Image: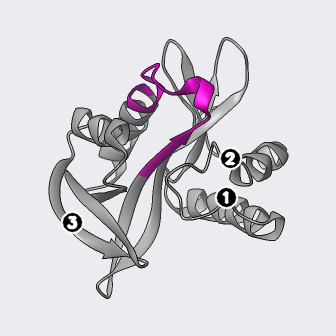
Amino acid sequence: MTDAVTTPRLQVRPPEEADRARFVELFRDDDFMLFHPHVLSEAEAEARFDHMIDVCRTIPFGKQPVVERASGLVVGYTGVDHIDIDGRSRLEWGYRFVPEARGLGYATEASRALLEKARRTYAGELLAIIDPRNVASQNVALKLGFAFWTRSRVDGDVCDLYTLTLG
């Protein structure tokens, strides 16, 4: 797959219809959705997966499945999505992994690989929105080059906002 980026342990590639069942399962799982306001209903999970596909049609570094090469399993995702904050549309970088894949450096490894692809096609600011209690995610953002910007309310929740400028 030419749109995929590969590291020694991972492949990051655009979502495919064959990924739907896995992501619907993950979006409905409490452990996967840790630090998200709630798990999604089946209809919400289906819509979120459709949205992932739609974003990747126009942004080559939209949120994409991260596949563990040794097992062939989708262990999470990384990439951007659109978000409106303070009346301004931004690109929000995010990552989320199954508990078994956390603490292995996968978020940093997969995100670095996809950020390299982003650098070839995009110049501008990326935003990372992180729950203040999620120290592991804060550490990943810092390793990726994001810098703390501010603490703010996003959709009613207190979040730490980090920025990274490409280009």
Residue 94 % position (x, y): 44, 51
Q: Does the magenta stretch include residue 139?
A: no
Residue 15, label in figure: 2
Say if mark 2 contacts mark 3, CB within 8 Å: no
Residue 151, label in figure: 3
Distance in Å between CA atoms under marks 1 and 3: 30 Å
The amino acid type of the residue labelled 1 equals: Ile
Front-most of residues 112 and 42 = 42
Residue 53, label in figure: 1
Residue 159 % position (x, y): 32, 63
Q: Residues within 10 Å of mark 2 (few under 14, many from 20)?
A: many
The amino acid type of the residue labelled 3 equals: Arg
Say if mark 1 contacts mark 3, CB within 8 Å: no
Element marked by disc 2: loop
- Could you tell whether 79 is left or right of 165 in the image? right
Q: First in sequence: mark 1 or mark 3?
A: 1
The amino acid type of the residue labelled 2 equals: Pro
Q: First in sequence: mark 1 or mark 2?
A: 2
Q: First in sequence: mark 2 or mark 3?
A: 2
The picture quadrant where one finds residue 151 is bottom left
Which residues lie in the magenta part?
94-109
Task: Say which of marks 2 and 3 sits in front.
Answer: 3
Task: Say which of marks 1 and 3 sits in front.
Answer: 3
Q: How crowded is mark 1: few (under 14 residues within 10 Å), some or many (20 or more)?
A: many
- Could you tell whether 157 is left or right of 143 in the image? right
- Could you tell whether 38 is left or right of 108 in the image? right
Q: Considering only vertical position in the picture, is 106 above or below 14?
A: above
